[in-house]
Amino acid sequence: MASTDNKLENAISNLKKESLRITEPRKALLKLLIDTHKPLSAEELHEALGSEQYDLVTVYRNLETFEKAGIVSRIPTESGKGLYEMNDEQKHYHHIICRHCHKAEKLDECHIHELEEIATKLGFSNITHVLELYGVCQECR
Ligand SMILES: [Zn+2]
Ligand SMILES: [Zn+2]
């Protein structure tokens, strides 16, 4: 597994490839995303960064930028709010996310194949899917 520094370097070189500026707030946000092992909302990231230094709008904007650059994934939640995490080397997986604390486990298997076949038979191509599971974790029960 790559270390935090390697991951940060990778993310920064991706930003550079997209001709995006590497600012201190962006670096701090990337570092936080790399060190956090569960998806967080913009508000949670903002709080963890120290809300004095960075305003929430900047956090939102940078997350959007990272998402467009393919560095960060946005996971939709039932409430409509997005949770953010670093992209994991293009590996395909889904999550089970705790509604209360946002603790997330990765589900390595994907069983959507059958549905995709049905969709293909209906004449669709370039089929993708978004699937996240929600529940209440052991600690929050
Ligand atoms: Zn929980
Ligand atoms: Zn899938």
Image (cartoon, rainbow, N blue to C red):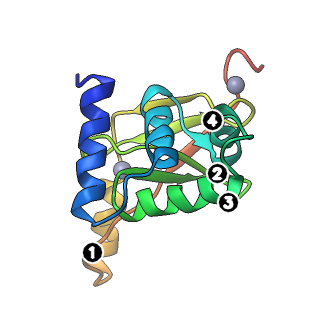
Nearer to the camera, 50 or 114 = 50
Residue 85 at x, y percent in the picture:
47, 42
Any mark on residue 49, and which?
4
For label 4, the crowd category at 10 Å Cα-Cα, with few meaning under 14, some 14 to 19 and many 20 or more, is some
Cα distance in 3D space between marks 2 and 4: 22 Å
The residue type indicated by label 1 comes to: Thr
Q: Which of the image's four quarters has the N terminus?
A: top left
Quarter residue 114 falls in: bottom left
Tell me whether circle 3 and circle 1 mark residues in contact (CB < 8 Å). no
* Badge nearest the viewer, 2 or 4: 4
Residue 34 locus on image (x, y percent): 42, 32
Q: Nearer the viewer, residue 132 or 64?
A: 64
Label 1 crowd bin: few (<14), some (14–19), many (20+), radius 10 Å: few
Q: Which residue is mark 3?
A: 57
Eye-nearest disc, 3 or 2: 3
The answer to which of marks 3 and 1 sits earlier in the sequence is: 3
Q: Nearer the viewer, residue 35 or 128?
A: 35
Which amino acid type is marked by label 2? Thr
Per the model, the C-alpha gap separating discs 2 and 1 is 27 Å
Please give the label number shown on residue 120: 1
Name the N-terminal-most of marks 3 and 2. 3
Secondary structure at numbered mark 3: helix
Q: Which residue is found at the position 44% from the left and 34% from the top?
A: 31
Q: Which mark is residue 77?
A: 2
**Quadrant of the image occupied by residue 79:** bottom right
Residue at image x 29%, y 27%?
5
Residue 140: image x %, image y %?
A: 76, 20
User: Dot 3: within a 10 Å radius of its alpha carbon, few (fewer than 14), some, or many (20 or more) residues?
Assistant: few
